C-alpha cells in the first residue's frame, strides 16, 4: 500500500511539473526599450536598478535599442572600446534577470539592437542596407524564437534620428527638404521588404516589429495636428499602407495618447504585430513608473536622461 501511495504521489508531482512547464509556455511577455547609450545610467550601480526593473516585469523576450556602452560613467566623455561592458557582456547581464540567450542585429555604428530571451534565438537576417541603394543607419535584425510549438518572427530596428538625410553633404539644405524624414521612409521600406515582405503569407504568420522609429504616426495626428502631407508621417504611413502590421499600443488604447519619450510630446517607439499575433495580446502598455520616468541629468549633460530618454513598452501574448 505504501509503495502504491508513493508511486501515486510521484505521478501527481510529475503531472504538476508538466502542467507548470506548459503554463510557462502559454504566455509570451515582451519588453522593448531604447535604453539610451547602453543603459549609461546603470553604469554607476553595476546595473542593479535596471536588473531589478527587468526582473519585476518577468519578460520572456527583451529587445534593447542603443545596446552598446559608449560614454564613461556620469560623463559625456567617450569610453575606450576595450573598456565597454556592452555589447560583449550582454550574456552576463541578461543572466542576472533570467535570460540564457542573446543576439545582436546588424549594425554599422554604436547603436545596435540586442535581443535577450528565455528561448533560443535564431537570426534569419542582420540588416545594414546596401551601399549601392540605402544604408540602414543603426541597423536592423530579423530573428525567430519557438514558443509552445509556434514560430515567432521578431524584427528589430532603429531608424535614422536626424533632421537631415544620412550622409547629406549640405545638412542645412537637407533639413529644409525634410531629408531626414524621407531617409527614414526609405529605411523602413527597405527593412520591411527584406523581412515580412520577403515571405509568402506573412500576414498569416506570427510577426512582431519594434524599435525606435524616430517618427510620428498619423494615428496620433489628433494630438500633433500635422498637415496631411507632412513628411513626419511618412514612415508609419508606409507601415500602415504596405504591410499587415497592427500598432499594438494604439489598438489597445484607442482613446489615449501615451508618449514614449521624456519630453512627453511624441510617441516614436512602437511595437507592431500581424493580426494572428495581435489577436493573442492580453496586455500592452508603455511603462511610466517611478524608475522609468525620464529625468534630465542633474549635471546638465546635453541630451542625457536617467534612466533613458525613452520609455519601455511591455506586451503580453497568450500563446496557447
Image: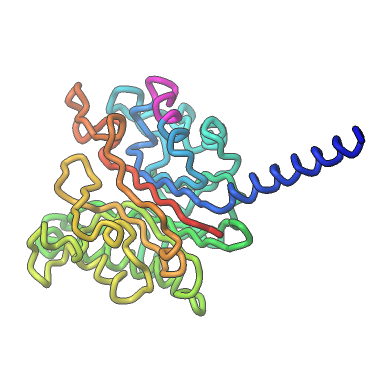
Image quarter of the C terminus: bottom right
Q: Residue at x 25, y 47 (%)?
A: 260
Q: Is 47 part of what is drawn in magenta?
A: yes
Front residue of 92/290: it is 290
* Residue 140 pos. (x, y %): 42, 57
Image quarter of the N terminus: top right
Q: Residue at x 51, y 62 (%)?
A: 153
* Residue 292 pos. (x, y %): 30, 34
**Residue at the outermost bottom position:** 200
* Residue 54 pos. (x, y %): 44, 35
Front residue of 34/6: it is 6
Q: Quadrant of residue 173?
A: bottom left
Q: Is residue 198 above or below residue 14?
A: below
Q: Quadrant of residue 14?
A: top right
Q: Residue at x 35, y 23 (%)?
A: 73
Q: Residue at x 42, y 41 (%)?
A: 67
* Residue 95 pos. (x, y %): 56, 33
Q: Is residue 181 left or right of residue 108?
A: left
Q: Magenta residues: mostly which secondary structure?
A: helix
Count every numbered label the image shows and give the total: 0
Q: Is residue 130 left or right of residue 296?
A: right
Front residue of 5/278: it is 5
- Residue 167 in view in this figure: no
The colour scheme is rainbow
- Residue 233 in view in this figure: yes
Front residue of 143/148: it is 148
**Residue at the outermost front position:** 1
Q: Is 85 part of what is drawn in magenta?
A: no
Residues drawn in magenta: 43-52
Amino acid at each position: 500500500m505504501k509503495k502504491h501511495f508513493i508511486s501515486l504521489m510521484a505521478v501527481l508531482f510529475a503531472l504538476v511539473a508538466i502542467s507548470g512547464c506548459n503554463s510557462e509556455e502559454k504566455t509570451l511577455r515582451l519588453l522593448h526599450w531604447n535604453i539610451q547609450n547602453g543603459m549609461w545610467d546603470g553604469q554607476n550601480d553595476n546595473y542593479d536598478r535596471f536588473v531589478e526593473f527587468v526582473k519585476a516585469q518577468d519578460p520572456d523576450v527583451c529587445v534593447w535599442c542603443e545596446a552598446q556602452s559608449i560614454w564613461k560613467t556620469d560623463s559625456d566623455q567617450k569610453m575606450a572600446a576595450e573598456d565597454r561592458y556592452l555589447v560583449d557582456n550582454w550574456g552576463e547581464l541578461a543572466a542576472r534577470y533570467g535570460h540564457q540567450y542573446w543576439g545582436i542585429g546588424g549594425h554599422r555604428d554604436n547603436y545596435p539592437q540586442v535581443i535577450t530571451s528565455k528561448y533560443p534565438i535564431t537570426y534569419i537576417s542582420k540588416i545594414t542596407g546596401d551601399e549601392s541603394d540605402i544604408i540602414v543607419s543603426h541597423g536592423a535584425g530579423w530573428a525567430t524564437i519557438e514558443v509552445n510549438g509556434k514560430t515567432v518572427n521578431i524584427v528589430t530596428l532603429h531608424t535614422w534620428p536626424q533632421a537631415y538625410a544620412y550622409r547629406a553633404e549640405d545638412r542645412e539644405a537637407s533639413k529644409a527638404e525634410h531629408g531626414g524624414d524621407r531617409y527614414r521612409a526609405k529605411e523602413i521600406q527597405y527593412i520591411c521588404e527584406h523581412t515580412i515582405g520577403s515571405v509568402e503569407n506573412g500576414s498569416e504568420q506570427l510577426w512582431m516589429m519594434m524599435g525606435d522609429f524616430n517618427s510620428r504616426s498619423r494615428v496620433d495626428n489628433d494630438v500633433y495636428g500635422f498637415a496631411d502631407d507632412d513628411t513626419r508621417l511618412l514612415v508609419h504611413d508606409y507601415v500602415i499602407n504596405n504591410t499587415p502590421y497592427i500598432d499594438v499600443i494604439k489598438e489597445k488604447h484607442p482613446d489615449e495618447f501615451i508618449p514614449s519619450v521624456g519630453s512627453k510630446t511624441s510617441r516614436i517607439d512602437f511595437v507592431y504585430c500581424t493580426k494572428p499575433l495581435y489577436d493573442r495580446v492580453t496586455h500592452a502598455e508603455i511603462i511610466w513608473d517611478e524608475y522609468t520616468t525620464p529625468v534630465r541629468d542633474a549635471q546638465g549633460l546635453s541630451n542625457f536622461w536617467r534612466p533613458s530618454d525613452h520609455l519601455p513598452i511591455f506586451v503580453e501574448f497568450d500563446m496557447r
